[in-house]
Amino acid sequence: MIRFVRALKSAALPGALGVLAASGQAPLGLWWVTVPALGIIAFFVSREERWRGRLWQGWAAGAGYFAASLFWIVEPFMVDAARDGWMAPFALVFLAGGMALFWMLAAAFAGLGRTLPARVGGFGLGLAATDLIRGYIFTGFPWALVGHVWVDTPVAQAAAFVGPVGLSLSTMAMACLPVAFQKRRWLGLAISLVLLAGLWGGGAVRLARTDPVRDPPIRVRLVQPNATQSLKWDPQMWGEFMRRQMDATAAHQDAPLNLVIWPETAVPWLLEDSADLLREIVAASGGVPVALGIQRDDGERSFNSLVATDGAGSIRAVYDKHHLVPFGEYIPFGDLLYDFGVKAFAAKAGKGYTAGHGAAVLDLGSAGKVLPLICYEAVFPQDLRSAPTRADWILQITNDGWFGNLAGPYQHLAQARLRAIEQGLPLMRVANTGVTAAIDSKGRVLRSLPLNSVGYFDIAVPAAMPPTFYARTGDWPSTMFIALGLLMLTAAQRRKTH
């Protein structure tokens, strides 16, 4: 019991610092709190001589960080609180505790050094490495990376060159340098400030450059019906949500439109039952093609899809979401269980969605070539890079009604903005309940609709920029830099040992 109490006491400060570090995530954006908090965490983890103590403090800091960043995970369970509410605290505890294992791994990297500066360096490189790993392992969950704290600042423009992991690496460098310079902390702080000033100034210069102009223009209408999640699938509300979308689609056009966009699962019926409805929607638009989210079946399999029509209401293109949410949209290994007679979790038996074939670019005629993303797919930069060709712009349809009104929708929006910067492509984002937004190729929100509001707006899609360095190279440069740094620490450790 005494050991348990001591363990809790030793975890209290790192956990609190983790909570402070999370304040840089949207919607707060307090990067100036995140950076010093990370530096203090690095100091406490690195000064601990016992490897068990280092791991415990790293885990505690991560638990605080992810509990504060990802508390919105309880919201899906509160949509039907009477049925699912009891699971909400367990979801948060297990998610935060599980994600904290990555910070524990970063603390283990601190053990590569024998001196405090080397351990601090190991922790900083390790945390950047775990941000990288989180984007790929177990289908990936790169949410709340430490580099995401810069989205509202000019520093985010560096993502066009180094991507989100490079931003995490830069953040950890700023945080760790003042701690690593034990006897000359002022020098470490000065270097950190120079790095910050360089990234800030470089981003400001990039933002100030004249943007290219698209000719001819592409004009789109973004429609937000405010289909709240608790009512979205209520048959008594289907007519109301459809009316809102049809009214917005039929509203006056100040200038000719090339496309009207509805959000994810905007239509409550299956695609195969909606041929007449699609023609009605396009008739309401005055012959303007429409892109919308809808579910479709193909035999025993179901898909979460985006459908684009032509000006007559016929289907021009279909995209099936391929990066599905584990346990939310499908059960891992469900089809394998089907082979053993367990059908409840199998996508092939109609329980859950089946993944589409992968990233695609849709030719929408006068609306240009579009890279479609459905909801969760916008958090994976590698998925955008896997598209077969370069698009003119990115289209994300989403249903963020699951994520409440506080952090989740804004963090999702922040990641969409990073995708635009990384690819140098504008992004049109249409959400059922918000935030619907038009984002240019530098990640700036040009116009938006607030959460929980009904509305629409028309806008010209900004022009694309030339392919960015990150669009061509992805995470490889950051990966090589992290790997080289860790190898150098390992080699130095071995030299001192012998």
Image: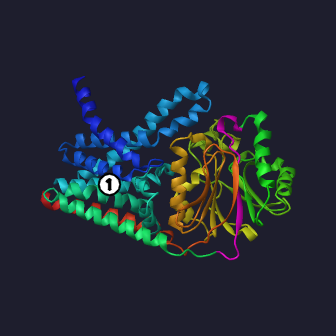
Instruction: Name the residue located 82 percent from the left edge and 53 percent from the top edge.
Output: 281
Q: Quadrant of the C terminus?
A: bottom left
Taking 85 as reference, is 202 above or below it? below
Comparing 458 with 289, the one in front is 458
Query: Which residues make up the magenta segment?
Result: 214-232
Q: Position of residue 458 (x, y in %)?
A: 70, 60
Q: Is residue 118 visible?
A: no
Q: Is residue 221 magenta?
A: yes
Comparing 328 with 429, the one in front is 429
Q: Position of residue 168 (x, y in %)?
A: 38, 57
Instruction: Name the residue located 40 percent from the left edge and 54 percent from the top edge.
Output: 131
Q: Is residue 436 magenta?
A: no
Q: Is residue 37 visible?
A: yes
Instruction: Say which residue label 1 marks.
Output: 126
Splitting the image into 4 quarters, where does residue 93 fall? top left
Q: Quadrant of the N terminus?
A: top left
- Determine crowd level at label 1: few under 14, some 14-19, many 20+ residues with C-alpha closer than 10 A: many
Comparing 186 with 63, the one in front is 186
